[in-house]
Image (cartoon, rainbow, N blue to C red):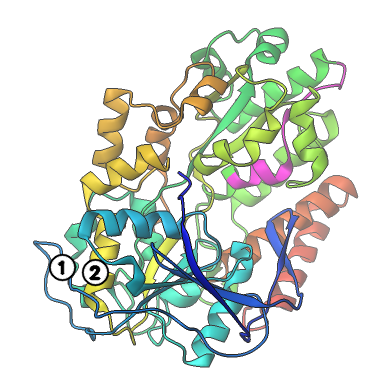
């Protein structure tokens, strides 16, 4: 949903924060520093402060903030009574929509809200948050990406447990289990407590060209395709068959990065155990699977996020892509632009998630009641989440709500459904989301270590043909150079 904003006033100012352009690499975004100016815009909805470089003050039009406490929750124990409810995030894709939904449901006046927009890629936002905390500027609620969320969730100086906003663990009982695992502190003063709440779940599946599947595999329905790729051995066999039947012209899978998204969600032990980096058996299994498909043409050699990666789906050089919920309205739009309606999606060889965002509260907030009602409306209230799922659209983090949507076959996005030849992708990915299990597997080092392993396998093991021992050695060397505190 795109918000229609009527501009009433704008004022320019200088702000000291690092700016960034968005450039893709195989893990997402990287930042390119750039000097620009910053604008704070007061609209009839809420104040948006876009931070992109230089020095000092935010101007906000405010009035006395009303209190909106949802019924059934405990009282808040953090400070209340602040004039401006300040929310920070890295882009305007989700936060403004969530704020508008909150305002519509709870009557909060939008000119009491200051949205600080870093206007950068999610992987760069952590540096901006550090700068914001160091500045001492006002901040009530902010958003954390899955890859680095624990950096803040485990830091009781920068996040408060949600019990201090009156929430009980039972209030989050309908969330998908893996999202609670990521939002729960694993160390520090809040260890074991839920600190972050996500309004969305991001399960992924395997989207494939139906005409190519029929031609090379004889699969005429999603059920037939799923039976051919229901585990990694079957997936590898199907990929080899496609490569052979097409004389090497068509790869079955889009990239090693896509495969790794699915494989890495199914590790059997944490990356770090007692301060020591570990490689479990699933890592070797991925490396061997990746090398086999790299050599026989079952997986494309394109780097995830590159132009060639996108073009593979457009020029019939790639049959399938690993796609999460948000990807169907993101990169997959471009991938499938020349083959609209010729796609289906299945669960694939393993349940996995890709991405996600958690809402956390600054322990120094002075708007605890507003923070409570905002998080409640975004991540707990089933009626509000049902509306958000179908109007945004987004796969919301509430199993009962998604059960209802799936049973009613409510269509979240007619364009995506048409692209998938009538399939409702929410229905396909619903069981996947419930199957994801991260209990005891999450560490603050996960994003960095996952990327180091993918790079080692892609370059050393597959491209350069080095031994597993040499590849593992390169991996450990890279991890220790980035994390000298680990053994």
The residue under label 2 is 372
Residue 209 against residue 164 in the figure, above or below: above
> Could you say whether the residue bearing mark 2 is in a helix, strand or loop?
helix
Lower sequence index among marks 1 and 2: 1
The answer to whether residue 243 is left or right of residue 157 is: right
Residue 260 appears at what percent x and percent y?
64, 46
Q: What is the quadrant of residue 215 in the picture?
A: top right
Residue 146 appears at what percent x and percent y?
50, 61
Q: What is the quadrant of residue 367 in the picture?
A: bottom left
Pick the front one: 174 or 138: 138
Q: Residue at x 57, y 64 (%)?
A: 446
> Could you say whether the residue bearing mark 1 is in a helix, strand or loop?
loop
Instruction: Write the start and end of the magenta stretch as one range.
Output: 247-261
Q: Residues within 10 Å of mark 1 (few under 14, many from 20)?
A: many
Residue 295 against residue 304 in the figure, above or below: above
Residue 69, labelled with which disc? 1
Locate the N terminus and report the quarter of the image it occupies: top left
Pick the front one: 399 or 22: 22
- Looking at the image, can residue 302 be seen? no
Residue 259 is a magenta residue: yes
Residue 14 appears at what percent x and percent y?
63, 85
Locate the C terminus and report the quarter of the image it occupies: bottom right
Q: Residue at x 39, y 78 (%)?
A: 61
Marks 1 & 2, CB-CB < 8 Å contact: yes
Q: Residues within 10 Å of mark 2 (few under 14, many from 20)?
A: many
Q: Residue at x 63, y 34 (%)?
A: 333
Name the outermost residue toward the right.
Answer: 464
Residue 396, labelled with which disc? none
Residue 234 appears at what percent x and percent y?
61, 24
Residue 257 is a magenta residue: yes
């Amino acid at each position: 949903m795109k918000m229609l904003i009527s501009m009433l006033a704008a004022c320019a100012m200088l702000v000291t924060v690092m700016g960034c352009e968005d450039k893709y690499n195989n893990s997402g975004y990287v930042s390119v520093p750039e000097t620009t100016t910053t604008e704070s815009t007061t609209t009839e909805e809420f104040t948006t402060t876009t931070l992109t470089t230089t020095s000092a003050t935010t101007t906000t039009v405010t009035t006395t903030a009303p209190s909106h406490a949802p019924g059934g929750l405990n009282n808040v124990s953090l400070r209340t009574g602040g004039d401006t409810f300040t929310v920070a995030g890295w882009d305007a894709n989700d936060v403004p929509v969530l704020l508008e939904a909150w305002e519509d449901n709870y009557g909060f006046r939008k000119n009491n809200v200051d949205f600080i927009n870093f206007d950068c890629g999610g992987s760069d936002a952590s540096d901006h948050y550090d700068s914001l905390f160091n500045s001492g500027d006002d901040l009530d609620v902010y958003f954390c990406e899955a890859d680095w969320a624990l950096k803040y969730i485990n830091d009781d100086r920068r996040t408060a447990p949600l019990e201090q906003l009156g929430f009980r663990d039972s209030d989050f009982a309908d969330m998908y289990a893996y999202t609670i695992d990521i939002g729960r502190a694993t160390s520090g003063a809040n260890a074991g407590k839920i600190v972050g709440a996500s309004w969305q779940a991001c399960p992924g599946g395997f989207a494939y060209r139906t005409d190519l599947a029929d031609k090379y595999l004889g699969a005429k329905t999603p059920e037939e395709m799923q039976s051919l790729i229901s585990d990694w051995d079957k997936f590898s066999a199907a990929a080899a068959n496609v490569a052979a039947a097409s004389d090497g012209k068509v790869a079955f899978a889009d990239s090693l990065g896509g495969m790794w998204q699915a494989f890495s969600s199914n590790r059997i032990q944490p990356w770090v155990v007692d301060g020591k980096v570990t490689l479990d058996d699933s890592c070797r299994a991925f490396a061997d699977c990746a090398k086999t498909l790299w050599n026989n043409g079952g997986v494309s050699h394109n780097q995830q996020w590159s132009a060639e990666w996108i073009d593979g789906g457009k020029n019939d050089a790639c049959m399938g892509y690993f796609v999460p919920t948000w990807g169907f309205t993101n990169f997959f739009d471009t991938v499938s632009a020349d083959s609209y309606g010729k796609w289906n999606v299945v669960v694939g060889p393993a349940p996995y998630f890709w991405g996600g965002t958690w809402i956390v509260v600054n322990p120094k907030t002075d708007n605890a009641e507003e923070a409570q009602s905002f998080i409640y409306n975004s991540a707990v209230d089933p009626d509000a989440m049902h509306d958000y799922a179908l109007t945004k659209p987004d796969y919301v983090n509430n199993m009962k709500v998604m059960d209802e949507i799936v049973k009613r076959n409510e269509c979240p996005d007619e364009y995506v459904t048409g692209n998938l030849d009538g399939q409702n992708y929410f229905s396909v990915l619903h069981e996947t989301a419930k199957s994801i299990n991260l209990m005891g597997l999450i560490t603050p080092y996960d994003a960095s270590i996952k990327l180091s392993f993918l790079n080692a396998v892609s370059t050393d093991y597959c491209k350069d043909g080095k031994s597993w021992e040499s590849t593992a050695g390169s991996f450990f060397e890279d991890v220790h150079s980035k994390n000298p505190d680990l053994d």
